[in-house]
Image (spheres, rainbow, N blue to C red):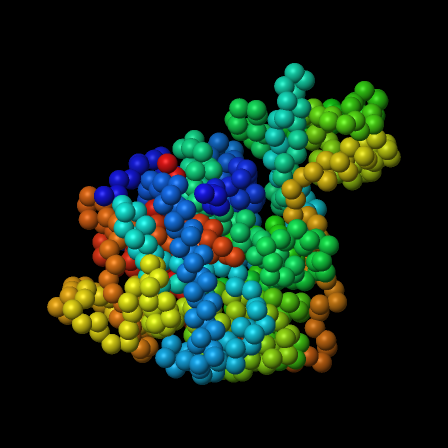
Amino acid sequence: MIKTEAVQPISHQLMEEVGMSWHTDVDGTAYLVNELVHVTEDEAEAYYAAANATYDMFIAAGQHVIDNELFFELDIPFNLISQIKRSWDNDDLHLYGRFDFAGGLDGLPIKLIEFNADTPTSLFETAVVQWALLKANGMDEAHQFNTVYEAIQHNFRRLITGLGDDTSDFSTQYQQQNILFSSMPDLPEDERTVKFLQQIAADAGFQTDFAYMGDVAFSEDDGIFSSETRFDYWFKLFPWEDIALETDGITGLLEDISRKQACTLLNPAYTLLFQSKGMMKVLYELFPDSPYLLETQLEPLPGKKQVAKTMFGREGANTVLYDAMGKVLKTIPGEYDNYRKVYQEFAPFPQDEEGRSYQAGVFFAWEGCGLGFRRAWDIHDDLSKFVSHRIV
Amino acid sequence: MKKHYIKRVTSYSMVGSLGFAIVAGLQGCSEGPLPVDSQQNQSNSIADAAAEGYFMIIQQTGMNPDTYELKERYPSSQGTRAILRDMNGEEQVLSEAELTQLAEAEARKLEEGTSKLSQPVAQNQGLGLGEMILASAAGALLGNMLANRLMGNRNFQQHQQRTNQRVQSSMNSTRQPAQNKTAKQQSSKRSGFFGGQGGSNRGGGLFGG
């Protein structure tokens, strides 16, 4: 049974001053819970190990999908396949992603639910807000599994120093390469996430700029621009599968830009493979004995409690929970029904005495680098609450 | 078992300049929203910040005499401010006015030849608070004219170089995009992609997962 520790909140004023404007949900309840989940060192270490082992499996599975042309099985849009392959062959850097895990506390085994590899959020909450909560309560800031900022900073430097552990040579190799950061307007959570990444890149030593998606200019020969400045890298918080649906020629332009290596996009197109829930089936086929994987198929699993979800559903949308007899226990509607479904064996989440369950989000940037929890009643959707943690 | 996830050294660098804003806010020393959050088009804020000021983390390293070390320094668009962390881990925010006062007093001592900064850099030598601040941010606090005059003192120059070598800093590059990155005249660029989108329950994000 999860027991949380109540702590003094951070004022809304301070949160807003640092850009955390989405502290309250539309129903008026707090999104940021003023409680801390207690995590032991061994539990934190187990989450770290799970993220690293799972990422290695994703790399192997990605190669398997590409080698065997399994794109259709993952619902990958055909007009992105060449960009996916090219970004994979080029070893384009995967800046960061977030694993969602069931289990991990109360002796429950850690099980992979999905990998938000392309456009993960909760970044600011995990990296900054829960750190600030320890700070505000006079607690030791080292007692948290949270090296998100540092890990992403090192990953930015790897754009220059290459894919090795050591990034200390950045300042001698850096030749004024620049990074443009973009999100959609009127979405403060997305914008804060992107501007936080921009700050990390600037702190890492890069020239950076921000422009809304609609203000970015594209040239098939020369790359990507903002205000007449050309950029070497473009980070966009905009899903690859949605880019594929745009009918105004942007996909072809990005294809040309990628082919001519006029700009490198972050996160790379291949992260769409990881983002597809069809990957859960591929992983299970390749690594059926992994302790971290749940059985996942394209057809319902006979006699098992399970969750049906669509290939590119987000925030729990279009998710159906079934009991072992196939009876629907809970349905969350959504806008992603046009994608195919996967059926994933249900894994228990740790719960508190009120019956609310806790899903662990573990950020990955070269290695596991930060832990945060989302709390909800059944299915973790976009009204679930963020809960910070403290290592005890 | 090797513990990978615990930070090796507690440090504000784990959240960069936001760490300062949060600690200052928690101590009631907030000076309004950060530019990165509040300004919609703040593309040059980092570049401007480098010219406008710093925020610094200063760590006390010894007592009797009190010595200090500059731990971190970042560009700031809100003037120069510092967090002073004493030997017990207690933190205190120093405002620009306080920093300037300390720097001015130290500059006078330097010009009179009574500051440690006017003496050669010695092995294992610690600097006092005013000395540390002047060596860290003379230009930002006193203006370039006076800072340049101080730089005429070779010993001060060496103290400043030593301080700069030790600090964790992000300022190893100029921030303005290089001029040679601009578009060729004949390049045909198109913009205006990614049109209107819907909403979400939190009203804050739409595309995250």
Looking at the rendered image, the quarter that the N terminus of chain A falls into is top left
**In this view, which residue lies farthest toward the top?**
B64
Looking at the image, can residue A318 be seen? no
Looking at the image, can residue A293 be seen? yes
Q: Quadrant of residue A379?
A: bottom left
Residue B88 vs B46, above or below: the answer is above
Which residue is rendered at x = 30% and y = 53% of the image? A109
Who is closer to the viewer here, A51 or B97? A51
Which residue is rendered at x = 52% and y = 45% of the image? B15
Looking at the rendered image, the quarter that the C terminus of chain A falls into is top left
Residue A302, position as x, y percentages in the image: 18, 72
Which residue is rendered at x = 41% and y = 46% of the image? A45
Q: Quadrant of residue A288?
A: bottom left
Which residue is rendered at x = 79% and y = 36% of the image? B147
Q: With A85 as the anchor, is A293 left or right in this view?
A: left
Residue A92, position as x, y percentages in the image: 57, 68
Residue A146 vs A8, above or below: the answer is below
Residue A199, position as x, y percentages in the image: 57, 52
Residue B176, position as x, y percentages in the image: 69, 57
Q: With A93 as the anchor, is A184 left or right in this view?
A: left
Residue B161 vs A74, above or below: the answer is above
Q: With A359 as the anchor, is B141 left or right in this view?
A: right
Q: Exactly how many numbered labels are in the figure?
A: 0
